[in-house]
Amino acid sequence: MFSKEESRKLREEFWISFGKSFPRKWILYDTKLKGFAFKFHFDTKSALVTLDLEDDLENRINFWDKLQSLKTILTEEFLPDAIFEEAYYLENGKEISRIYVNLDQKVSIHNKNTWRDVMEFFVEKMTLFEAFFEDYKDFIDS
């Protein structure tokens, strides 16, 4: 077990290492679309790359409907293993809509031996998410 402070330091070390190993400006929160954000998630059990819709319900529904209409393109041309969840509940109980890709292996941010696999997964999947977004941003934002 790790103390909270040890865990915090490991998390910080991971993200610094990721930034140094793969220096790149990611779109992430800067999509220019309110409530539409890409995220990296890595904890003691899993690693995910997500597209989260977190705005008010009307805006979420609008984005979700457009993304649903592009689902075949996203899964056939970009991310075949993408999972669509219209109602996804965060740990704090907040409901969002989420499209995500999960790294299908046992990883932990506390285990440095898994870090390289997670970093490579993040780069590969986020690059594909961003390419999809760039190709279809105008439609999504219409």
Image (cartoon, helix red, strand yellow):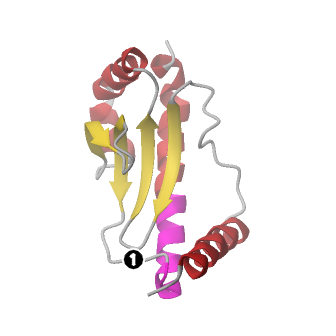
Residue depicted at x 43% and y 47%: 50
Camera-side residue of 31 and 2: 2
Camera-side residue of 142 and 135: 142
Please give the residue where the numbered disc 1 appears in the rendered image: 107
Please state the extent of the stretch shown in magenta in the rendering: 110-124
Quarter occupied by the N terminus? bottom left
Q: Which amino acid lies under the numbered mark 1 shown in the image of this protein?
A: Val
- From the top left corner, tell me how far across and down residue 129 is, in percent: 47, 44
The number of discs equals: 1
- From the top left corner, tell me how far across and down residue 107 is, in percent: 39, 77
Q: Is residue 112 magenta?
A: yes
- From the top left corner, tell me how far across and down residue 81 is, in percent: 28, 53
Quadrant position of residue 45: bottom left
Would residue 92 be found to the left or right of residue 21 on screen? left
Quadrant position of residue 68: top left
The 10 Å Cα crowd at callout 1, few under 14, some 14 to 19, many 20 or more, is many
